[in-house]
Image (cartoon, grey):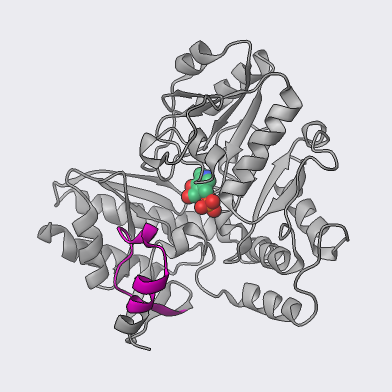
Amino acid sequence: MTTDETMALYSSHVIGNYDAVRVPVVLVKGEGSYVWDQEGRRYLDLFPGWGVNGLGHCHPAVVGAVQKQTGKLMHVANDYYNEHQGRLAGMIAERSFGGKCFFCNSGAEAVEAAIKLARIYCSPRYKIITMTNSFHGRTSMAMVATAQPKYQFGLPPVDLGFVYVPFDDLDAVAAAIDADTCAVMVEPIQGEGGVNIPGADYHARLRELCDRHNMLLIYDEVTTGSGRTGKYYAYQHFGAEPDIMTLAKAMGGGLAVGAIEARPDVAAKLTPGTHASTFGGNPLACVGAIALLETIERDNLLEHGTKMGEKLMDGLRGLAGTFDMIADVRGKGCLIGMELKVPGAEFRTLCRNEGLLINCTHGNVIRFYPSLCAAPEEIDEAVSIVKTVLPRI
Ligand SMILES: Cc1ncc(COP(=O)(O)O)c(C=O)c1O
């Protein structure tokens, strides 16, 4: 099938909600940091799958584990045990704060579960404080939690119990707390909001504030978790532990997996009947997620990813000396933003034409989420393409 034929099928049969962002490229194959299109053109993918492909495309450890499991048992309902779900939950707990997990299939579902659990645990308190420029997903409750009106469509005209305050502003959080407030939900580092890293003591002080008011702290680690920032979970950079954490994206090594982990006493409130997911924690998804954690450990990828992220940031900062349109380069590990003084949409297109896939968020922040396995030469290639493209915008 040609690219035009594939696009024609979409035009006739697929709802056009992605039309504003979808580019005329049909991807057919991926390996490591590269993907190929239907015409055989190769691209260096530094924003693989919106951050899902944390080990790059088709990592052999994930492919091998999934192939083996596919021939054995793909799906069983949660009214039976499967040997992989419990093991995965234990591996996440060991690497984080010793909580218990509930499994689902996406980030928004994890956010929904976290909101529900916080409200059950703290009942009758129900208000949740979230941050300006946050992103928590597109289901109804997750989009209300997302403090950005541009993402809020189709909501009923009722108050769903969220209060918005500026990110990285503790006084604003303190001022927003009232007798009905049960939790604060925040990304440790905002991704979609523009790769925003809070001050060094923000999270520790937020933790204290939550403790003082007997409120839960929910970290949305859908983007920042699973090694993306050079720690297993980004909160580990900041000296504050959550009561509930959400996971998805890179968690499954490329498969659709989501989860929450909650402090055991909080988790205990998700009693039988309160929550469920048909696909959540199925054996196939779990072996992908286990392969991701095993590979990060075996190949020392937190350290490697941190080095590659620093190499990329150094390269981009080097370009800032020559190209005045770079306002800032910031990031942690393999979560990197380059803020431009001009809109970034054209830059994204020009990079694609030169064979580099990246993302632009908030109008002018270029996001690079390289795989934790990226090679130094791939980082050099990306910087070289950026250098070629910058004078053209
Ligand atoms: C921090 C955060 N939470 C939740 C979500 C929603 O995840 P999903 O698209 O898998 O529902 C996203 C997606 O970008 C995210 O970045």
Region rendered in magenta: 7-29
**Going 40% across and 53% down the picture, which residue do you hit?**
310
| Quadrant location, the N terminus | bottom left
Residue 204 versus residue 284 in the image, above or below: above
How many dots with numbers?
0
Q: Taking 384 as reference, is 48 left or right?
A: right
**Which of the pair 319/98 is nearer the observer?**
98
Residue 201 visible at all: no
Quarter-wise, where is residue 210 in the image?
A: top right
Extreme-left residue of the structure: 392
The reply to whether the magenta stretch includes residue 19 is yes
**Going 39% across and 63% down the picture, which residue do you hit?**
46
- The percent coordinates of residue 165 (x first, y second) are 44, 22
**Going 67% across and 79% down the picture, which residue do you hit?**
64
Q: Taking 345 as reference, is 200 left or right?
A: right
- The percent coordinates of residue 364 (x first, y second) are 25, 46
**Going 70% across and 48% down the picture, which residue do you hit?**
95
- The percent coordinates of residue 201 (x first, y second) are 51, 25
| Quadrant location, the C terminus | bottom left
Extreme-right residue of the structure: 80
- The percent coordinates of residue 283 (x first, y second) are 76, 67
Quarter-wise, where is residue 147 in the image?
A: top left
Residue 73 visible at all: yes
**Which of the pair 140/40 is nearer the observer?**
140
**Which of the pair 312/96 is nearer the observer?**
96
Q: Taking 26 as reference, is 351 left or right?
A: left
Residue 339 versus residue 358 in the image, above or below: above
